[in-house]
Image (spheres, helix red, strand yellow):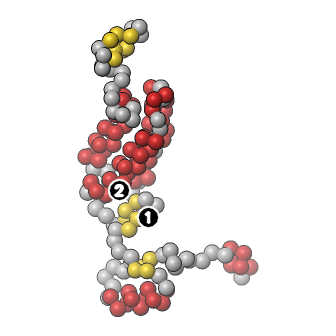
Amino acid sequence: MITHSINFTYVNFFKSCLIGINVHRDFMDMACNFLNCNEGNLPFKYLGLLVGANSSSFSTWKPLLEHVTTHLNSWENKYISFGGRIVLLNLVINVIPIFYISFLKMPEKVWRRLVKIQREFLWGGVTGVKRLVGSSGGRCVNQRRRVVLV
């Protein structure tokens, strides 16, 4: 009795929805009216993850790709060094898909697109223009002008 009065936990039915699987329509209407909540349907979003969606579909993974792209575009890459971009990719961007992968199997097409986005950021930055082509003995070749910088 004492712990219940101190805890103050309850379900907010205005934010909740009821999803019925193999349930008659009349029962769902009565249950939603009794609980004073909305009726939901599949797939639904929970913590940014589509529950009940086809994991092999590219459209299921599109929000993840947009999320990663948005994060990369939010950093103005003009003044971030090559080492800084590596740290951003390893510590921030590579962590984002882990939540999705823990629940759904990522298709190879999505994985290839994710790696492509990361490579474009690493080598070209936000604009996608490749700045650093190769280096040898402290010399870097700029692809645009074909000039060797010492």
Determine the residue positioned at 28% across, 56% down: 59
Residue 4 vertical placement versus 88 (above, below): below
**Quarter assignment of residue 38:** bottom left
Q: Quadrant of the N terminus?
A: bottom right
Outermost residue to the front: 145
Quick one: SS at disc 1?
Answer: strand
- Compared across the picture, whether 143 is left or right of 46 comes to left
At 29% from the left edge and 47% from the top edge, which residue is drawn?
A: 110
Q: Which residue is mark 1?
A: 46
Q: Is residue 22 above or below residue 47?
A: below
- Give 6 or 74, whichever is nearer the viewer: 74
Secondary structure at badge 2 equals: loop
Q: Residues within 10 Å of mark 2 (few under 14, many from 20)?
A: some
Of the numbered discs in the image, which one, if any, rests on residue 104? 2
Up-down relation of residue 144 to residue 47 (above or below): above
The quadrant of the rendering that contains the C terminus is top left
Image coords of residue 28 (percent x, y): 38, 87
